[in-house]
Amino acid sequence: MNVGIGPKITALTAGERATLDALCDCLFPPGAATPGAVTIGASGYIDQALAGPYAVFVSEYRAMLGSLDQAAGGSFVGATDKLAVVAALERDELPGLLRNPDRTTFDLVIRHLREGLFSDPIHGGNKDFAGWKAVGFPGAQFGFREGEQKLDYQVDRQPQSLTQVSQDARLPGLPRTIPSTAGIPANPDVLIVGGGAVGNFMALKFVRAGLQVVILEAGPPRTGRERSMDELLATAFRNEGGAAKFNDEVPTWRTRPGEKARRAVMSQGLETALGGNSIAWGAVAMRFYEDDFRIRSATAAKYGDHRIPEGSTLADWPMSYAELEPFYEEAEDLLGVSGHAGNRENPDRSRGNPFEAPRANPYKMPALRTSGLGQLFADSAKAQGYHPFPLPAAIATTAWNGRHACTYCSFCSRFGCHVDAKASAQNTVLPEALESGRLHIVSGARAMEIVTDESGRAVGVNYLGLDGETRFQAGGTVVVAAYAFENSRLLLLSRSRRHGRGVGNETDQVGRHYMTRQQPSVYAIFEGKRLNRFIGPTAQAMAIADLSGDHFDHSDVDFIRGGRIAAFNQYLPIEASGVLPPDVPRWGEAWRDFFLSSYNSTAMLFIDPEILPYENNRLDLDPDVKDKLGRPVIRITFDIGDNERKLMQYLQDRAEKIALGMGATRTWRRQFLTGPISTHDVGGTRMGNDPATSVTNGFGEVHDTPGLVVLGGSSFVSLPPVNPALTILALALRAADHIISQNTGAAA
């Protein structure tokens, strides 16, 4: 079936298109049994994209195509040494190229080529599914049977476009249009900046307590099923979910003060729309461990103060696990979390995580089923003395509160769920909160500054509407609940006579203690095996926590803390085509042959190392780079310390040993420093009891600004090797109770 996008509108002249065709067939040449890039439709995809979503790159392409012709003596199409010219392009050595400080032109072209080869045919490439057929990817399928995830199973399905996937019309969905102005109270009890998970989960508690709530959301409304099976639009490079705001304000990054910061354009994208990252998250829903909340004191008591790395601002949290445990349970109940408990309350504890903190009740549903790859990992890990367990996930494994059970499709992390099995704000808390009539959402409302009165108390927010007008929205309590970057940015931009350095920043703590997850994974090839890793959600993973936190004795190692190792599913072809061992080039016959032969036999042992806070690392306002409104973007100053480098080496050694025990025929390692943005970005408005070293107290109340509460990942004191989402929600629900008690005199 030939799936297309209708009439083709292209950007290039016939001569330019001929040069592009020749280039693309050099990058992905035809082989004995494989069509080349032109036949697959990659160059046609690029030409069409340049006339649409990539129009901003037309000048760069024209300069590049002209440079190719010039370097080839006038005609690249007729040149006999095309490969030498392409090699010079990759080295960024051709004269006439438009220079970009953040990447090379070749970086851009190879990215677009991969999209044209392996994206859904609706975007103009991958003709007749030729790219997918070449690697054995079945495309958009409603779901997969358990047997299809067994090792070496031949998945025998005709590839499908997302337009061919049927969905159960009975499944619930949030209306696409949410009123933006009608009936907004002038002075609600609570004003929330940010319509992501934090804001919406808190809103439900507030309306249940009878409070009036207004949410200002910078992005548009949505159901939560958008991009449910479209890798192209969900990738960090295209990131349709961030089109309303984030894509225009990508932070800059440097490793040290004094360096020139570069835009982190090739890093991970974030969502800017109703529901925030609760739509795109991978849904791993783990609690922190008990000693994660007393990390500094526990380390010092066991090993001595001298083991705290020099320059680290490591600190204890202003609450214990026991204080947060009821709110972990409340968050799990609202989300619907599947898993196997590993503590004494579970009669089948051998299937769970034996290191987990005490919990009052088991998980709501059984864990996601174990894939063939997961079992292979578990067997190897167990043989080496570890205790593998399935990661708990906010994904329904049975029908749950009107949501469909997981179908184990190929699209989960970075995607909306096509059957609402994966929890999001839209399919958990928003329907009830909106039905109450006490929640009012203003979409397309970009918060510009927090407004304080003469006493320094927060009284509301000035925001920019879709019509370009700036408006003021008051609130009894103002809650800033955006992503870590925007939380710090908004505070720093909110300056007044009483807050000359920004609200919350009286002691210069806003932006400090920033941490971001690094992903020094170990890749493994199992030559001749079919892993079928493209089936199933990312969270359908087996993991070990034996090396996390202080679960092993650190007396004889030269680092503190640890990390989680896991074998994840979900392996989609656009992103997978960029996963290469160091000796495989990223274009040409060698790249083509490697990827086509190894796509379905490549696994990743994902490492989540604990990242410590350091004096060096912080967020501030970039003095040079602005967004479209002329407002400075966030500048990230971040590097890992020697402690993390030693820790990652230790974890990679053990992950590689597990991979070899699984039967891997080849392994390679990712670098230690993997980027400044990870979607596990935390810190910047740290919680604490001392205003000299923190921005808020344990309830998110800003020390120097009464009436203002800041919550989200920016509140974190440390970044354990656990996905942060569940702890973010537990902190928010605990803070919501505190706000309710102040408004009504009693907790919810």
Image: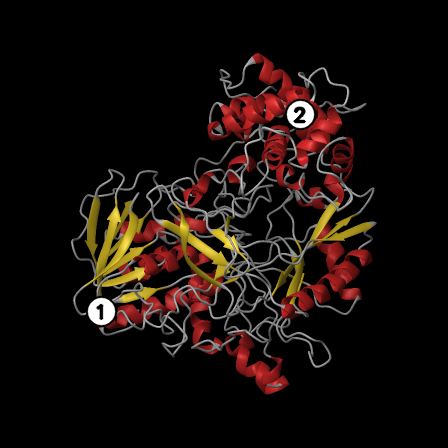
**Is residue 37 visible to the viewer in this orientation of the structure?**
no
Residue 455 found in image quarter: bottom left
Tell which of 707 and 59 is nearer to you. Answer: 59
> Where residue 577 appears, x then y in whole percent?
67, 38
**Residue found at the far top of this picture:** 14
Is disc 1 placed on a helix, strand or loop? helix
What amino acid type is highlighted by mark number 1?
A: Asn
Q: How is the image coloured?
A: secondary structure
Residue 340 seen in render: yes
Which of discs 2 and 1 lies nearer the camera? The answer is 2
Question: What residue does disc 2 label?
Answer: 24
Q: Residue at x 51, y 43 (%)?
A: 415
Q: In this view, does 657 lie to the left or right of 494?
A: right
Q: Quadrant of the C terminus?
A: bottom left
* Secondary structure category for the residue under label 2: helix
Residue for point 39% across, 55% down: 486
Residue in the image at 54% along x and 14% along y:
13
Name the residue tied to disc 1: 743
State the image coordinates of residue 1 (x, y, percent, origin top left): 61, 20
Height in image: 337 above or below 403? Answer: below
Image x and y of residue 376, in percent = 76, 55
Amino acid tagged 2: Cys
> Which of pointers 2 and 1 lies earlier in the amino acid sequence?
2
The mark found on residue 543 in the picture is none
Position in image of residue 311 (x %, y %): 55, 74
